[in-house]
Image: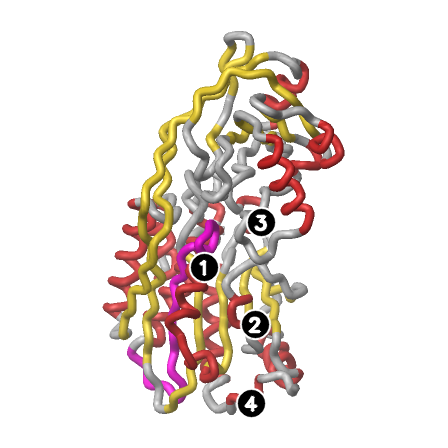
């Protein structure tokens, strides 16, 4: 599929092609916020910048040597700096971690311990398993940690928590294999990093309607470190901005609120700041529509709905029927729509099957996004917005 230079695709090229990585507290994050604010302003939206403090972490490079040979390594996000030479102690399971003597040594975590990134200490969706691993690591006081990425050929940082104070780095699968073959050897890990107080901001563009009720449209614009974040989530923000351009000058029965969230990838999350400033405004939301991972060339756009009434669901089924390329999927919580659905607000989440294959990776570039599929999300959402204009607030709510 070619990528036509539609409004959404132009926004994506700016965000992920020109600006690139947009992690909180970085210049890229601030540049993206400025761009979004300019688009909202050009659409005659009333713009609020919801700024708040966050850590500003800078990766200045990392190195790892085994028997004098350099190995591939990347500092984990928010890792403190270190220069450590110590014995390498591997652990594959929680049971092995419990038995390991890590004091003053470098823990090599792999296998069952690194099938997914370790949840942040303050993350409300973390599991008891995450808590157990974090507790064991902090109690055992290793000098540093090395986490092994189990997906061959890819590198995703596996610890990303500014409250976790043990220096750590991630290595690709082949490096992990080389280290495991030499477990018990001394390795040298150096992490050059810098952290200082920083700031980030949600951008909220409001278009008042004839009535106090409103529809919220949202997408997060921040990324992980060192990824251009085209599928996660430049495409979602591009759809959000294209919708702002489509509806910004249109008279509406219900108002529209366009929210470009920050802090979705790392704590502190922008949703908390949005809720703090919203007050009683949540009671006036007819529906919330979130875009996170739309437009992938590797799979169809997907849609799900949460916390809506049966009438709301049946209505969406009718609207999506003419879109055979849009697939319904079960509800999933890991994005900004949960801020609304958990409070009983009918919520819709757009994504795509292929997005999860590239999310958080350095190869999450514009070439993997379909302009046609971005436009499809804009078109379907436009129909949803128009169709909700005559629906009373209670119509979409689940009955208590």
The magenta-colored residue range is: 249-269
Q: Is residue 273 left or right of residue 123?
A: left
Which mark is first along the chain, 4 or 1?
1
Label 2: which residue?
A: 341
Spatial separation of the CA atoms under disc 2 and disc 3:
22 Å
Label 3: which residue?
A: 356
Seen from the viewer's position, the closer of residues 386 and 312 is 312
Seen from the viewer's position, the closer of residues 246 and 283 is 283
Which mark is first along the chain, 4 or 2?
2
Estimate how packed mark 2 is, as few (under 14), some (14 to 19) or many (20 or more) residues with alpha carbons within 10 Å.
Answer: some
In the rendered image, residue 342, in percent from the top left (x then y), is placed at 58, 71
Estimate how packed mark 4 is, as few (under 14), some (14 to 19) or many (20 or more) residues with alpha carbons within 10 Å.
Answer: few
Spatial separation of the CA atoms under disc 3 and disc 1:
14 Å
Q: Examine the rendering and report whether any part of residue 252 can be seen.
A: yes
* Residue 335 numbered tag: none
User: Vertically, is 348 above or below 87?
Assistant: below
Which mark is first along the chain, 1 or 2?
1
Spatial separation of the CA atoms under disc 2 and disc 1:
19 Å
- Residue at position x 66%, y 16% from top? 183
Classify residue 237 by image quadrant. bottom left
* Residue 394 numbered tag: 4
The quarter of the rendered structure image containing the C terminus is bottom right
Label 1: which residue?
A: 236
Q: Residue furthest right?
A: 95
Which mark is first along the chain, 3 or 4?
3
Identify the secondary structure beneath mark 1: helix
Q: Is residue 208 left or right of residue 369?
A: left
Which mark is first along the chain, 1 or 3?
1
Which mark is first along the chain, 3 or 2?
2
State the scheme by which the image is colored: secondary structure
């Amino acid at each position: 599929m070619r990528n036509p230079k539609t409004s959404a695709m132009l926004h994506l090229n700016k965000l992920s092609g020109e600006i690139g990585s947009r992690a909180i507290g970085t210049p890229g994050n601030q540049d993206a916020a400025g761009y979004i604010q300019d688009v909202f302003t050009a659409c005659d939206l009333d713009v609020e910048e919801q700024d708040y403090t966050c850590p500003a972490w800078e990766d200045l490079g990392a190195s790892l040597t085994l028997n004098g040979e350099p190995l591939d390594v990347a500092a984990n996000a928010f890792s403190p700096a270190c220069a450590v030479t110590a014995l390498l102690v591997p652990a594959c399971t929680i049971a092995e971690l419990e038995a390991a003597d890590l004091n003053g040594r470098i823990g090599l975590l792999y296998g069952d311990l690194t099938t997914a990134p370790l949840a942040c200490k303050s993350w409300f969706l973390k599991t008891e398993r995450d808590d157990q691993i974090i507790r064991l690591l902090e109690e055992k006081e290793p000098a540093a940690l090395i986490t092994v990425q189990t997906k061959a050929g890819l590198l995703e940082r596996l610890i990303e928590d500014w409250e976790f104070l043990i220096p750590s780095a991630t290595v690709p699968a082949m490096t992990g294999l080389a280290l495991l073959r030499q477990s018990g050897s001394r390795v040298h890990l150096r992490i050059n990093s810098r952290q200082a107080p920083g700031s980030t901001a949600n951008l909220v563009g409001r278009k008042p309607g004839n009535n106090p009720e409103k529809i919220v449209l949202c997408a997060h614009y921040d990324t992980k470190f060192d990824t251009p974040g085209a599928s996660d989530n430049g495409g979602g923000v591009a759809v959000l901005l294209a919708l702002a351009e489509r509806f910004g000058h249109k008279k509406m029965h219900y108002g529209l609120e366009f929210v470009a969230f920050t802090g979705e990838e790392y704590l502190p999350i922008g949703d908390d700041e949005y809720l703090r400033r919203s007050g009683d405004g949540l009671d006036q939301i007819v529906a919330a529509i979130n875009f996170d991972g739309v437009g992938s060339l590797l799979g169809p756009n997907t849609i799900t709905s949460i916390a809506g009434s049966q009438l709301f669901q049946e209505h969406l089924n009718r609207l999506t029927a003419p879109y055979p390329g849009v697939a319904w999927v079960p509800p999933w919580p890991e994005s900004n729509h949960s801020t609304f659905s958990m409070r009983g607000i009918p919520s819709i989440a757009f994504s795509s099957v292929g997005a999860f294959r590239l999310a958080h990776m350095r190869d999450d570039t514009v070439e993997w996004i379909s302009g046609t599929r971005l436009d499809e999300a804009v078109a379907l959402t436009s129909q949803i917005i128009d169709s909700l204009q005559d629906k009373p607030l209670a119509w979409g709510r689940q009955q208590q």
